[in-house]
Image: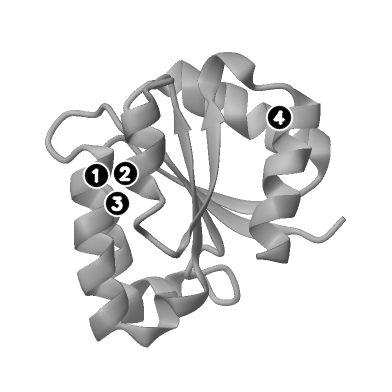
Amino acid sequence: MKDYTIMMIDDDEVDRYLLKRALKKVDFAGHIFEADNGQVAIEFLSNYEHNAKLFPGKFPPVIIFLDINMPLMDGFEFLEAFVKLRATTRVFENSILTLYTSSKCAEDRHRVKGYDFVKGYLVKEDLTVQNLKETMKVCIVS
């Protein structure tokens, strides 16, 4: 499989660990960036020139896994900030997001459909290697 640079945005260290382990099992993950809330992630992504030099060939991330419920800046606030970042920094046009959340709420699923760059929705308790493979294939094909 191809290695993709990935970013995980989640305040729960255990959930990030489980996702990282599953990504390595499905052999999709190359370099993995981590942030424990949306604010840290936006600041990291906004520092494009510095990070492109610091992580040549690995920045920006191609696929971003995003939790909804986080402190400081939640997933929906991150999505709004990411829309603005994409508009000013064209390099993020190819970044694909998938929600990785504990929320099974139909309203949350519907709400993320308003963002054309969000391609997947993976409920944490449903994380299996097979579900992750299917989610990644949808993200990559889209």
> Looking at the picture, how far across and down is residue 103, in whole percent?
39, 22
Q: CA distance from mark 2 to mark 1?
A: 9 Å
Residue labelled with disc 3: 41
Q: Which of marks 3 and 4 precedes in the sequence? A: 4
Q: Which of marks 1 and 2 precedes in the sequence? A: 1
Residue labelled with disc 2: 111
Q: Nearer the viewer, residue 107 or 127?
A: 107
Q: Which of marks 1 and 4 precedes in the sequence? A: 4
Q: Provide the secondary structure element on which disc 3 rests.
A: helix
Amino acid bearing label 1? Phe
Q: Provide the secondary structure element on which disc 2 rests.
A: helix
Q: Answer above or below: position of 118 versus 46.
A: above
- Foreground: disc 4 or disc 1: 1
> Looking at the picture, how far across and down is residue 88, in whole percent?
24, 84
What residue is shown at x 44% (from left), y 71% (from top)? 54
Residue labelled with disc 4: 22
Q: CA distance from mark 4 to mark 3?
A: 21 Å
Residue labelled with disc 1: 76
Amino acid bearing label 3? Ala
What residue is shown at x 42% (from left), y 75% (from top)? 92
Q: Which of marks 2 and 3 precedes in the sequence? A: 3
Extreme residue toward the left, this view: 72
Amino acid bearing label 2? Arg
Q: Provide the secondary structure element on which disc 1 rests.
A: helix
Q: Quadrant of residue 70?
A: top left
